[in-house]
Amino acid sequence: MTDPVARDVLVRVAKLSKHFPTKLAWPKTAAAPHVIAWRAVSRMNATVKAVSEVDLEIYQGETLGLVGESGCGKSTLGRTILRLLEPSAGTIEFAGRDLTRLTRRALRPLRREMQMIFQDPYASLNPRMSIGDAIGEPLEIHALAKTSRERAARVQELLARVGLRGDAAERYPHEFSGGQRQRIGIARALACRPRFIVCDEPISALDVSIQAQIVNLLEDLQEAEKLTYLFISHDLKIVQHICDRVAVMYLGRIVELADAKTLYRDPKHPYSIALLSAVPRIDPAKRRDRVILQGDVPSPLSPPPGCPFHTRCPVASKPRACFEELPRLRVLSNGSQAACHVAE
Ligand code: SF4
């Protein structure tokens, strides 16, 4: 974990949305046979609002955690920031350049500087490609190695950097354990000397004994390579350990954004309070009552009006505001930002 002394903004996201058009099946109601047949082929248009109007700044050299229940839009936001998914609305600035205005061709040199580490490195590695070729591929795509000898030397350097032996270059993905495959994924992400890496649940598929090793490796690399991370995870303990600041997402929106220490000590948004109440604490004096949320997360196909959390909120106390007005992020008494009409 680094201390974000310099608060230079590397990534700035404004009103970023990612919506997916989809088709819904008609409800099964009694109807004439020709209507049932017609419904089978014609389906209703609908929109999945995976990410809605996200404003976010990521500072140079920091690790910004992104937490929330699965399906809340964390991975979609990470991929949209890298423009692996095209945004539906809003802007993404990287190092002062608006990525949303760039053509795919103009974006290419910037792609080098923004990489991703995936949850399942096995799925992102071609099983028929040797590890040397997999790590060397980005060097070729971005013409970063003039000769095959130069490329091989850089692959060896990267393998050593992530703690793997040089002979791994000749082997294939199935010959490695989950932790080793994640090291390979990290080496591939590092190949182009990026400045910004989106780490999408990078340890959640690994054994607990291996998780700490990968987290330590990510921290060492951050310091050595001056990296900035967006660290997506549902593991709140790991996020507390590794992140400088944390953004909490619910139903496609950021509902709280705070310094990690402040968030874990004094969460303000009722959703953050419920999430963090599940984190085990060793010190009995710091233990909190567990808040069990009732009901399911509403569908992103039809988010509720007003505050998106109002259907599960245990403290919704301003009926008109909570049920009718969308709360925006605002700065609270402890310096954190929360999107809640009630939090102070
Ligand atoms: Fe709960 Fe109202 Fe705050 Fe939403 S705005 S989190 S419903 S108190």
Image: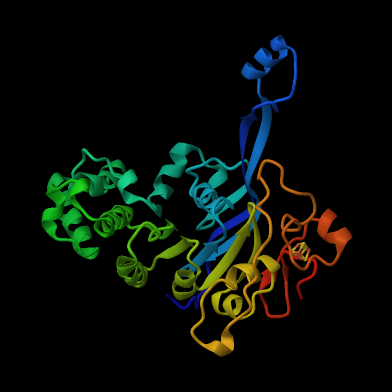
Q: Can you say whether 192 is above or below 1 in the image?
A: above
Q: Which residue is drawn at 75% across and 65% down?
A: 340
Name the residue furthest bottom: 285
Answer with the quarter of the image where residue 19 lies: top right
Q: Which residue lies furthest to the right in this view?
A: 320
- Which quarter of the frame holds ligand 1? bottom right
Q: How was this image coloured?
A: rainbow
The spot of residue 244 in percent (x, y) is 50, 73
**Where residue 210 sits in the image (x, y, percent)?**
30, 66
Q: In which quarter of the image is the N terminus?
A: bottom left
Q: List x then y, in percent, for residue 232.
A: 48, 59
Q: Which of 45 and 115 is in front in this view?
A: 45
The answer to whether residue 145 of the structure is visible from this angle is no
At a point 16% along the width and 57% down the height, the residue shown is 156
Query: In the drawing, does residue 307 fall left or right of residue 136?
Result: right
Q: Residue 15: horizontal and vertical position, in percent?
A: 66, 52
Q: In which quarter of the image is residue 246?
A: bottom right
Q: Is residue 190 visible?
A: yes
206 w.r.t. 5: above or below: above
Q: 2 or 311, which is in the foreground?
A: 311
Q: Name the side, left or right, on which 22 lies relative to 163.
A: right
**In this image, 309 relative to 107: left or right?**
right
Q: Which residue lies furthest to the front in this view?
A: 30
Tally the marks: 0
Residue drawn 82% across and 60% down? 322
Instruction: Give 125 or 94, whichever is nearer the viewer.
Output: 125
